[in-house]
Image: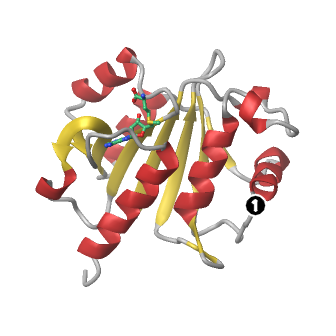
Amino acid sequence: MRALILKSNTACIENINPRSPASSGRFDVILDFVLECLYGDKSVRKDVTIYAVLSGCGRTRTIVFRGEELPYIETEDDLLRLVLSGDVQILDMGFEELLEDLSRRGFRLFCLIEDGKDVDKVELPCSNVGFIIGDQDGFTPDDVIIMRRRNIEFISIGPLPYLSWFCCVFINYVLDRRCRDS
Ligand SMILES: C[S@@+](CC[C@H](N)C(=O)[O-])C[C@H]1O[C@@H](n2cnc3c(N)ncnc32)[C@H](O)[C@@H]1O
């Protein structure tokens, strides 16, 4: 199983305006991430679970998008409708708790960051692996402290800053290629 963790410091569930996800703490970043990362051409990636950690309001909560349970969805509007319908799991779990939970379940975690170690030089496990990606503004200093404290490895896909959804697609591509025969 592959876990993709998007840490948003602006979005939150309580604050979604269905008419304008972009002005709802950039909830559009979450929607794009899930659409690009979980859905292929007419198919859902069953090997991927996305955790959207939403810290934009007081209490952090985490939406879980489990590929093996979700229907095929094509548009942002349909995905937003699914979120608002309550048909996705919402965990009362903050960032550190989620990382602790994944580690306890045997996941090896990596954080994507521009100045991390070149991904080409990093050995990645083919399963039980998780990648943490920041939102449109990147990580807060507290996020970084939490990850450093847990000895999470920082890896880079290049010196340029890419959009969150692209990082997710790219890391899926890297793992798909490396793990083709496993
Ligand atoms: C739009 S970028 C954030 C850019 C922001 N200026 C910053 O200071 O981090 C969103 C996230 O994608 C990931 N990311 C973007 N470019 C990357 C790169 N070249 N290598 C690794 N991760 C990257 C990081 O997790 C980043 O927090």
Q: Position of residue 98 (x, y in %)?
A: 44, 37
Q: Position of residue 147 (x, y in %)?
A: 30, 29
Density class for disc 1 (Cα within 10 Å; few <14, some 14-19, many ≥20) is few
Query: Camera-side residue: 5 or 119?
Result: 119
Q: Residue at x 61, y 24 (%)?
A: 10
Q: Residue at x 71, y 69 (%)?
A: 71
Q: Position of residue 104 (x, y in %)?
A: 32, 44
Query: Looking at the picture, does residue 61 appear above or below residue 3?
Result: above
Specify the quadrant of the image occupied by residue 54. Answer: top right
Q: Residue at x 24, y 72 (%)?
A: 178
Q: Amino acid at mark 1?
A: Thr
Name, please, the residue furthest toward the left.
Answer: 121
Q: Quadrant of the N terminus?
A: bottom left
Q: Position of residue 150 (x, y in %)?
A: 24, 30
Q: Residue at x 58, y 25 (%)?
A: 60
Q: Is residue 23 left or right of residue 68?
A: right
Name, please, the residue furthest toward the bottom.
Answer: 181
Q: Quadrant of the C terminus?
A: bottom left
The residue that disc 1 covers is: 75
Indicate if the residue with disc 1 has its beta carbon within 8 Å of ligand 1: no
Query: Looking at the picture, does residue 159 appear above or below residue 24?
Result: below
Q: Is residue 102 left or right of residue 26?
A: left
Query: Camera-side residue: 122 or 152?
Result: 122
Could you say whether the residue bearing mark 1 is in a helix, strand or loop?
A: loop
Q: How many marks?
A: 1
Colouring convention used in this rendered image of the protein: secondary structure
Q: Is residue 75 left or right of residue 52?
A: right
Q: Quadrant of ligand 1?
A: top left
Name, please, the residue furthest toward the right.
Answer: 19
